[in-house]
Image (cartoon, helix red, strand yellow):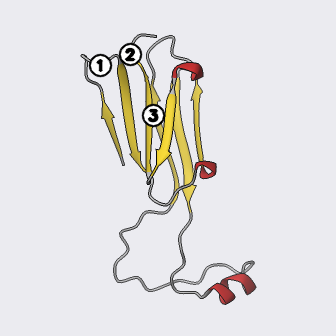
Amino acid sequence: RMDLCDDPDNPYITAALELPGMKAEQLSVRIENGNLIVEGERSGPYLHRTTATRASASSLPEPPALYPAQELKYGKFRRELKLPSGVTAAHVRSMLAEGMLTISWPRDP
């Protein structure tokens, strides 16, 4: 999930993305064709297997599991935002802390 703050009185636009449990090396933040792209992949914890089973059966397909409630999101994700004209990677600031990725860029570079 993402919040985008675009306050006209602030010289910066800021995006905040919820990424609980993610590490910086699992994310890609880049600029392509004037767009800010954030993407990554969150792997599932496989609660139905023990560590020993997981290690010995790593090449086997994942068996179906019974999850009466499954609200946590796993898998690949991608967000793409149009940046103001002239914004480059040197203008963009990002920080990942406590499961929140905060990215800001100037409204008028």
Q: CA distance from mark 3 to mark 1?
A: 14 Å
Q: CA distance from mark 2 to mark 3?
A: 13 Å
Return the x and y of residue 80 as percentages of the image width and height: 47, 34
Question: Do the numbered discs 2 and 3 sit on residues whose CB atoms are within 8 Å?
Answer: no
Return the x and y of residue 49 as percentages of the image width and height: 58, 87
Question: Do the numbered discs 3 and 1 sit on residues whose CB atoms are within 8 Å?
Answer: no
Return the x and y of residue 73 as percentages of the image width and height: 43, 63
Point 74% across, 86% down: residue: 56
In the drawing, what numbered circle is on residue 107? 2
**Horizontal side of residue 90 vs 97, given as left or right:** right
Three-letter code for the amino acid on which mark 2 is drawn: Arg
Three-letter code for the amino acid on which mark 1 is drawn: Asn
Report crowding for label 1: few under 14, some 14 to 19, many 20 or more residues within 10 A (C-alpha): few
Q: Which residue is mark 1?
A: 10
Q: Which residue is mark 3?
A: 103
Label whose residue precedes the other's in the sequence (3 or 1): 1
Is 18 situated above or below 10? below
SS for dot 3: strand
Point 37% across, 30% down: residue: 14
In the drawing, what numbered circle is on residue 40? none
Of residue 33 and residue 21, the one placed in the foreground of this image is: 21
Point 40% across, 45% down: residue: 17
Of residue 70 and residue 13, the one placed in the foreground of this image is: 13
Q: CA distance from mark 1 to mark 2?
A: 8 Å
Three-letter code for the amino acid on which mark 3 is drawn: Ile
Question: Do the numbered discs 1 and 2 sit on residues whose CB atoms are within 8 Å?
Answer: yes
Point 67% across, 78% down: residue: 61
